[in-house]
Image (tube, rainbow, N blue to C red):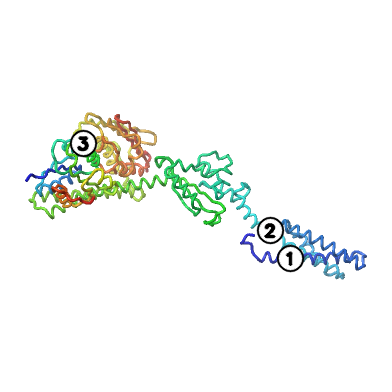
């Protein structure tokens, strides 16, 4: 079975490192980006199974990144998980219905939660995960 | 009648009104009898009748118009006269004098009660007359010079009175007589955000209510706090309304800044906290080698330190703003401070490919400043200059010596600060929403702290900037700081 390919876009190096560590430890393959625009370039050059991205990022905000992907031609239906410290400020209806994100995780979150959300989202017939 | 008029005065007045004419008529008749030779019972009857009628009508007139003056002198002189003549044998004369004196005393009591009643009535009238534009009473004048906009309308919203502050706030000429105009035309609620809802609520209910009205697109365009209270407190069926209009702009701006601060502070505090939790959770769950474990523990402690530093800075700022943090002042050679700060920045500037230039006059005076705080302020300003200037640029520190002030300029050839951000950069946690700077780290407290340090020294920190040309921060320090 092929390993799951994950794109992790997070500008905080420490957080990026620990999320990557946890994904690797369950046997996924991870590519990282510290800027939103870099993440978009990476996304367009590979076929990822899941996107994890921070909202507040230099280059391009997480929501803008997901919107661009959804409107594009390359892999537009990829499961996307949004991480943010301002989870309450966001319009959850928009996130769920328009951007079709799998989950919005508020910081501080549990890394286990990220791993299990990724596993759920990438199952052949994914169960809907509450946003 | 005003409810606060003492009832005894009315009762007394009634008694005096009844007793006084009768007594006066009897007395005057006695005097006339004593003086005149008239003896016929018919003539006497007519005389009594005429005198009684005349006196009752005079007293009634005086009472109705409250024009009663005290007969103080008459009363006093008559009673003195009665005393001095008490040795006389003519007892008839003494009785007459005493009688007249006591009539005068009764009259005086009546006059006093009436004056009291008249004062109470005039206050009542002045309250009622406000709406009529009676400019001669104190309540009216108070309403006119009130700092809040005040208006009185009937129940349909037709203005009966408005003060100059009202005219100023709704932007009409204060000399124009507003009486008869519609309050809703003054307020122009329909053209304001959410104004139609407010208008509907005002027109559908008459209970006391308060509304916040934003005048333009941003808060700084102006915010009103509008209150309407039914007059006489009869909310279900008011005769009239009192409208109070207050300028709420400064308070609204302060509330907005506070919300922004709380939001930003939460974000800044959550970031290290999220890292600490993620690392500790991973450590307790995952299998890992000793090196990784050590690395993870180090990250946790450095994130905890970052959190602590952030809290320290916040506390420092708070103490400075509250005035509870005192400076550790000592005489310092300003040139040495500048050198120290520049030496600290030199490696960083070189690493980024920037030229660090320093121009200082030779005769700088010694100044009493908090050395550590001024050095870290200069490092902070130079650090920003280095951070926001592209490689190949220049950061220049120059000193200008004036009579009372030393001005230290830190200039760069960097990307500049957008004009609309210039007045916000000293705010706590403010960070420019500029895509060109979004990859620069910082918690947005540096400049807030720097300005507080400058203010504590009796100086200031100012900024000038032009996009793509550069920024110039100036620290103003008074030379005579004791």
- Left/right of residue A52 with respect to residue B427 in the rendered view: left
- Left/right of residue A130 with respect to residue B251 in the rendered view: left
Whether marks 1 and 2 lie on the same chain: yes
Q: How many marks?
A: 3
- Gap in Å between the C-alphas at discs 1 and 2? 15 Å
Name the residue carrying label 1: B16
Q: Tag 1, which chain?
A: B
Q: Position of residue B187 (x, y in %)?
A: 49, 43
Name the residue carrying label 3: A72
The label on residue B115 is 2
Name the image quarter holding the C terminus of chain B.
top left
Q: Dot 2: what SS?
A: helix
Is tag 1's residue or tag 2's residue first in the polypeptide sequence?
Answer: 1
Q: Tag 3, which chain?
A: A
How would you rate the neighbour count of disc 2 (Cα within 10 Å): few for under 14, some for 14-19, many for 20 or more? some
Q: Are marks 1 and 3 in contact (CB under 8 Å)?
A: no
Q: Residue furthest front?
A: A125
Q: Nearer the viewer, residue B390 or B203?
A: B203
């Amino acid at each position: 079975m092929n390993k799951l390919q994950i794109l992790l876009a997070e500008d905080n190096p420490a957080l990026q490192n620990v999320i990557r560590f946890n994904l690797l430890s369950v046997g996924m393959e991870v590519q990282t980006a510290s800027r939103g625009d870099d993440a978009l370039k990476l996304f367009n050059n590979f076929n990822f199974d899941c996107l994890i991205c921070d909202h507040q990022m230099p280059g391009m905000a997480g929501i803008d990144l997901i919107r661009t992907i959804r409107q594009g031609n390359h892999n537009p239906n990829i499961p996307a998980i949004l991480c943010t410290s301002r989870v309450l400020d966001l319009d959850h209806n928009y996130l769920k219905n328009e951007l079709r994100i799998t989950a919005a995780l508020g910081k501080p979150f549990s890394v286990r939660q990220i791993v299990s959300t990724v596993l759920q989202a990438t199952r052949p017939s994914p169960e809907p995960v509450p946003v | 009648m005003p409810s606060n008029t003492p009832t005894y005065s009315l009762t007394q007045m009634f008694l005096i009104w009844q007793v006084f004419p009768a007594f006066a008529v009897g007395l005057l008749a006695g005097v006339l009898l004593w003086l005149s030779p008239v003896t016929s019972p018919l003539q006497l009857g007519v005389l009594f009748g005429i005198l009684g009628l005349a006196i009752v009508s005079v007293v009634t007139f005086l009472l109705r118009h409250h024009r009663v003056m005290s007969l103080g002198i008459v009363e006093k002189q008559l009673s003195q006269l009665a005393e001095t003549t008490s040795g006389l044998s003519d007892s008839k004369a003494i009785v007459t004098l005493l009688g007249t004196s006591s009539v005068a005393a009764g009259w005086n009591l009546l006059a006093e009660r009436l004056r009291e009643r008249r004062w109470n009535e005039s206050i009542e009238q002045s309250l009622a007359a406000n709406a009529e534009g009676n400019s001669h009473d104190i309540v009216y004048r108070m309403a006119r010079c009130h700092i809040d906009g005040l208006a009185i309308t009937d129940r349909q919203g037709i203005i009966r009175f408005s003060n100059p502050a009202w005219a100023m706030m709704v932007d009409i000429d204060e000399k124009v007589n507003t009486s008869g105009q519609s309050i809703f035309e003054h307020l122009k609620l329909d053209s304001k955000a959410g104004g139609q809802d407010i208008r509907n609520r005002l027109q559908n209910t008459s209970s006391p209510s308060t509304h916040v009205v934003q005048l333009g697109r941003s808060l700084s365009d102006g915010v009103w706090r509008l209150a309407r209270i039914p007059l006489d407190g009869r909310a279900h069926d008011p005769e009239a309304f009192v409208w109070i209009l207050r300028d709420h702009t400064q308070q609204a701006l302060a509330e907005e800044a506070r919300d922004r601060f709380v939001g930003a502070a939460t974000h800044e505090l959550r970031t290290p906290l999220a890292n600490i939790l993620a690392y500790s959770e991973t450590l307790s769950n995952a299998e890992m080698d000793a090196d990784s474990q050590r690395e993870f523990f180090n990250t946790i402690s450095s994130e905890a330190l970052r959190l602590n530093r952030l809290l320290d800075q916040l506390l420092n700022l708070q103490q400075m703003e509250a005035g509870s943090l005192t400076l550790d002042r000592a005489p310092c050679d300003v040139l040495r401070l500048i050198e120290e700060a520049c030496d600290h920045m030199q490696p960083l500037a070189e690493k980024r490919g920037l030229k660090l230039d320093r121009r200082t006059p030779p005769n700088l005076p010694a100044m009493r400043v908090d050395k550590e705080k001024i050095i870290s302020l200069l490092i902070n300003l130079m650090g920003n200059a280095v951070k926001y200037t592209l490689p190949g640029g220049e950061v220049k520190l120059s000193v200008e010596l004036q009579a009372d002030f030393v001005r230290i300029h830190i200039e760069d050839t960097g990307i500049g600060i957008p004009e609309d951000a210039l007045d916000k950069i000293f705010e706590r946690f403010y960070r420019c929403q500029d895509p060109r700077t979004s990859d620069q780290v910082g918690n947005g407290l540096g400049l807030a702290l720097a300005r507080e340090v400058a203010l504590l020294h009796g100086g200031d920190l100012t900024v000038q900037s032009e996009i793509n040309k550069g920024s110039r921060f100036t620290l103003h320090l008074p030379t005579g700081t004791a």
